[in-house]
Amino acid sequence: MTSPDVLNRYLFDDLHVRGELVQLTKSYQQNIAKHNYPQGVRVLLGELMAATCLLTATIKFEGDITVQLQGDGPIGYMAMNGNDRQEMRGIARLTEDTEAKGLKALIGKGNMIITIRPKNAEAYQGIVALEEESLADCLVHYFEVSEQIPTKIWLFSDDKNLQVAGSLVQLLPGSDDTDGGNKEQQQHDFEHICQLTNTIKAEEIFEIEAKQLLYRLYHQEKVRMFDPQDVSFVCGCSSEKCLTAIAQIEPSEIKSIIAEQGNVSMTCDFCLTTYAFDEQQLASYISEIKH
């Protein structure tokens, strides 16, 4: 991939349609690096990462978004968290070893839960059943029932080279009020762009940089690209956050753990980094114990 880990947003000047294109390599590889996920799980988590990037870019806000998949299949829980800076981290928890592939085989019967937490407003949540065959189609269904915005999503995975990508086409919200509210024409414009986007081949989205790919797809349209946004894997764990959690433990229990194990350790679920603290480092946390 020539321009990895970049999200591009664009508008069609003569149409009431917008689009997004995300191409991920390094950030995706870092997200799965320390986890020995089976291939099917790895691919689905990559699709979820690309999808979360696309979703985050459709919302004008400061804050974060979490997309969770929960079901009764081999994957009991999968989640991807991202924010307006396109900082991503994700995890999958398996209930059993599996070689299964695909959304239905891995998640089984379940739900997709999308939680949006604006920085200066209350969080809100949308839940839809995972009734479609693919993650992309489930997200389209989410937009249909939760946002009532015509949307189409494509997700791609290259497991050999550990790359993922995605594209989104969406009718501009509020466009019914423009051009005399010509819904029929707007729907036609949307479907036209979807048909063009549907011609994307996996080898193209992984090998061609965004500007060239968009020209190849939409060379007869007036496409206005915004500044690209870098996507990165950021776990967010730290010694400070671990110590904040340890501070909630009773001093006597901390002392007991140190006596038994030699230290108090915590391992991050996302990046699997382990933080260990000995008695000297935790002296202030156990000083409340009365002898």
Image: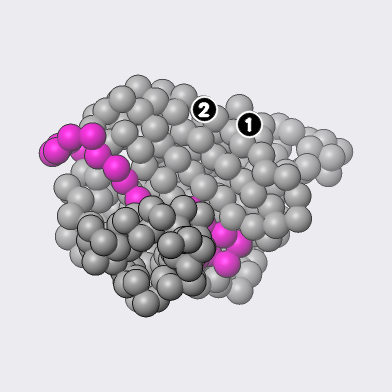
Alpha carbon of mark 2 to alpha carbon of mark 1: how far?
A: 9 Å
Q: Is residue 152 above or below residue 60?
A: above
Q: Let me know if residue 87 is in the magenta part.
A: yes
Q: Is residue 113 magenta?
A: no
255 or 96, which lies in front? 255
Q: Which mark is residue 80?
A: none
Q: Residues within 10 Å of mark 1 (few under 14, many from 20)?
A: few
264 on left or right of 222: left
Specify start and end residues of the magenta stretch as a single range: 81-101
Tags 2 and 1 in contact by the CB under 8 Å rule?
A: yes
According to the picture, the residue beneath numbered tag 2 turns out to be: 128
Q: Nearer the viewer, residue 48 or 151?
A: 48
Amino acid identity at mark 1: Ser
Residue located at (43% from left, 73% from top)? 283
Residue 147 x, y percent position in the rendering: 66, 35
Q: Nearer the viewer, residue 274 or 172?
A: 274
Quarter of the C terminus within the rendering: bottom left
Q: Earlier in the sequence, mark 2 or mark 1?
A: 2
Kind of residue at badge 2: Val
Which x, y percent locates residue 228? Answer: 55, 72
Which element is circle 1 on?
helix
Q: Report the label total.
A: 2
